[in-house]
Amino acid sequence: MTAWAADTVLAARGLVKCFGGITATDDVTLELKRGARHALIGPNGAGKTTLINLLTGVLEPSAGSISLLGQDISRMAPHQRVQRGLVRTFQINQLFNAMTPLQTLAMAVAQRRGQGARWWTPLGSGRGDIARRCDELLQQFHLADVMHQRTELLAYGKRRLLEIAIALACEPSVLLLDEPVAGVPAGQREELLQTVAALPAEVSVLLIEHDMDLVFSFASRMTVMVNGAVLTEGDPASIANDPRVRAVYLGQGDASAAIGARHG
């Protein structure tokens, strides 16, 4: 363990990922503190997706290391990282369209508790603890009113909420939220934004997002990536007032305007 491991739940150190002659991630070091609300931002092509794929095990690093709760996970498979508490919303399998939110969450909760073969029991009798956890998640993610609807019939915002609920059912210590409001219609965004803001304090969150309003309202710390490397890191005020960040986002539309508004 390093000196910083005591309050660091996820750490990337000197991460490099090369594809042939192209360096997609260039010596990236990132710390996620316990209970963090940390945002990862940057323009398209900055390397954010490559970094997240390295953290979650979709890609193997060319150099560097990743540790979770003090344990090196650099070569672990994605499912092993999930079992150890590193969960990504995008990493969850596609929703089962023919199942309801209740059925989906019952399966996820039972799987996490080693009872995957009997996931349906809370729908009838038996596993009351699984049923109680499903009810908590349905209430927390505003899904109680649609708990018996087939998932394919849900509004897109509700589907995104269900994805995050599934991630929480995995009992993560670290949750990577990959653009949670992407594609969500304006009329459905507020419910999702409020739910993201109310995520459990004990879950450390790394948010990857282009919506600057969400980023600045949610994050207490931010990392900015450009061209595969970390440009800067700091609290939202310092990021908003950093001329290098403003230069990166110059001409980037809504992101530039949002940062400019906070700079002014």
Image (cartoon, rainbow, N blue to C red):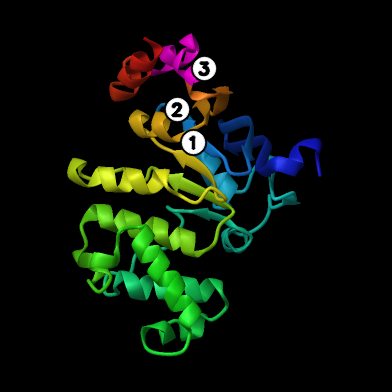
Residue 194 relative to residue 232: left or right: left
Asked if residue 241 is among those painted magenta in the image, a careful observer would answer yes
- Which numbered marker is on residue 238? 3
Question: How far, Cα to Cα, is label 1 from label 2?
Answer: 7 Å
Q: Nearer the viewer, mark 1 or mark 3?
A: 3
Secondary structure of the residue carrying tag 3 is helix
Classify 142 as above or below 39. below
Of residue 148 and residue 77, the one placed in the foreground of this image is 148
Task: Name the residue at 35% across, 76% down.
Answer: 103
Q: Amino acid at mark 3?
A: Ser
Q: Which residues are magenta?
A: 237-249
Q: Amino acid at mark 1?
A: Lys
Residue 92, visible in the rendered structure = no
- Which numbered marker is on residue 42? 2
Q: Quadrant of residue 1?
A: top right
Q: Which residue is mark 1?
A: 48
